[in-house]
Image (spheres, helix red, strand yellow):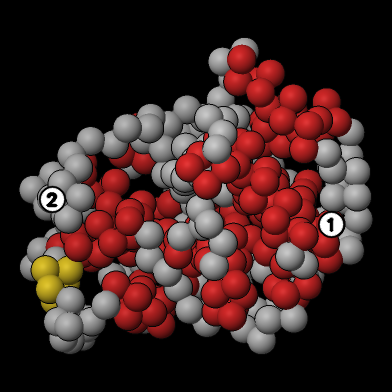
Amino acid sequence: MTEKRQQMFWHVAPLQSNPGKAFATLAPAKPTAVYDTYWRFAAERQAAFFRRHLGEPPPWSDDEILQTYKFTNAYRASDRASQYLIRNVIYRGPQATDEVFFRTILFKLFNKIETWELLNRELGELTWDTYSFERYDRVLTSAMDRKETIYSAAYIMPSGSRQNGSTKKHRSHLRLLERMMDDRLPDRIATAASMRDAFNVLVSYPMIGDFLAYQYVTDLNYSEICNFTEMEFVVPGPGAIDGISKCFASLGGLSETDIIKLVTDRQSAEFGRLGLHFQSLWGRPLQLIDCQNLFCEISKYARVRHPDVSGVAKRTRIKQKYRPNLRPIEYWYPPKWGINDRIENNFHSNSGYARM
């Protein structure tokens, strides 16, 4: 590895368990060997992100598990769907509160770039002002008749068929969005005093459980509708709960939410303890949502790295194989984070780095 590349990516220790390593004080919780792997995974996944960002050819990691299977980025906002949402949905189009809310939730109901582009191609600019249930339904039903997949596999969306009397899942979700708009939900989110208050409003709607409401409020918070801190609260999803059960032999009376907050607060100390120099997101440390996601990813990663650790879900295989998507991403984050100017400067100052 060249000196310049060391300076850029730092040194990431091999992703392997080390049961004899002294754990940081996390009492009363009792970590397992998987806990150290959690931090090594985070560091190597983020290093791979930067290698790709600088235009290096794949593979972007020497870790065979990362080469073989699909894992999200260390930072949620760096994933392809989130980047598309931020740049092409939230910040492209009218910036009125109701329009930004409408576009964001419409995208997230399906959470699939291809579905958004299909609707845009068939219907033109997607706005609440020109919305028509019949037109949207026609496009989506036709896509399903062609055996196209209109939903992402990232979240399990309840069908809502019982409440709406429809056998088509997307019709229930369109009706749900209509109800939100008619209830003036965009304004209620915009005037919420906290992220938790906005979450409580979202979770009161049918088909939206705690985890989906948390994801949605995080996405809305990328916009200028609201400006909550991502360090306020967190809702662990099923994958994160499984990951936590692998990282800890006992929580010692703490909840999964407590654990996520604890490790997020301790991130600098834990990377230092393991000799890992974690490259942050241009100065932005991991937030609660990111550490929650990392627990979900370690749930999968440990199925191969630590096959003897079953976790509460008892799953043994990673289903999604990694297939490189070479379509470039121009990384761009919510302007209020204040990091976009650093991205361009960083790229130009390091674009000549040699490959290992």
Quadrant of the image occupied by residue 218: bottom right
Q: Nearer the viewer, residue 206 or 279?
A: 206
> SS for tag 2?
loop
Q: CA distance from mark 1 to mark 2?
A: 45 Å
- Point out the residue furthest to the top here: 146
Residue 220, placed above or below residue 229: above
Residue type at the position of mark 2: Ser
Going from the N terminus, do you reach mark 1 or mark 2 first?
A: 1
Image point 48% across, 42% down: which residue? 162
Residue indicated by mark 2: 310
Residue type at the position of mark 1: Glu
Q: Is residue 114 left or right of residue 88?
A: left
Quadrant of the image occupied by residue 33: bottom left
Residue 60, image x, y percentages: 47, 40
Image point 67% across, 68% down: which residue? 221
> SS for tag 1?
helix
Is residue 262 shown to the viewer in this render?
A: yes
Residue indicated by mark 1: 99
Residue 87, image x, y percentages: 77, 51
Image point 19% across, 42% down: which residue? 315
Residue 282, placed above or below residue 89: below
Q: Nearer the viewer, residue 138 or 311?
A: 138
Q: Nearer the viewer, residue 294 or 150?
A: 150
- Point out the residue furthest to the front here: 165
